[in-house]
Amino acid sequence: MARFYGVATKYLPNDLGWRRCLERFGEALTPGVLLGQAVGRDSSP
């Protein structure tokens, strides 16, 4: 996925959610981890 180039106020909650996932999981971030986060499953590395 490409880096973010800016944040629109309209999408701020979504952008912050992406940032939290990137910071929390780092290199361990996979599609499965993202899906688990989206449905509320705790998938700590």
Image (tube, rainbow, N blue to C red):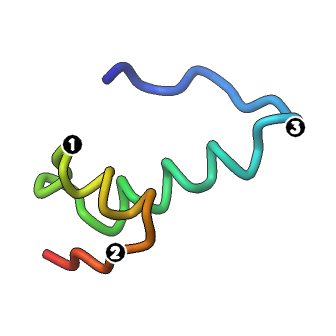
**Residue linked to disc 2:** 41
| Image quarter (top left, top right, bottom left or bottom right) of the N terminus | top left
Q: Which residue is denoted by mark 1 in the rendering?
A: 31
The CA distance from mark 3 to mark 2 is 27 Å
Mark 3 nearby-residue class (10 Å; few <14, some 14–19, many ≥20): few
Q: Type of residue at label 3? A: Thr
Residue that badge 3 annotates: 9
Point 52% across, 26% down: residue = 4
Q: Residues within 10 Å of mark 2 (few under 14, many from 20)?
A: few
Left or right: where 34 falls relative to 14: left
SS state under label 3: helix
Q: Position of residue 13 (x, y in %)?
A: 73, 52
The amino acid on which the numbered mark 2 sits, given as a three-letter code, is Arg
Q: Is residue 15 left or right of residue 2?
A: right
- Residue most extreme to the front: 39
35 left or right, relative to 17: left
Q: Nearer the viewer, mark 2 or mark 1?
A: 2
Q: Residues within 10 Å of mark 1 (few under 14, many from 20)?
A: few
Where disc 1 sits, the SS reads helix
Res. 14 image quadrant? top right
Callout 2: helix, strand or loop? loop
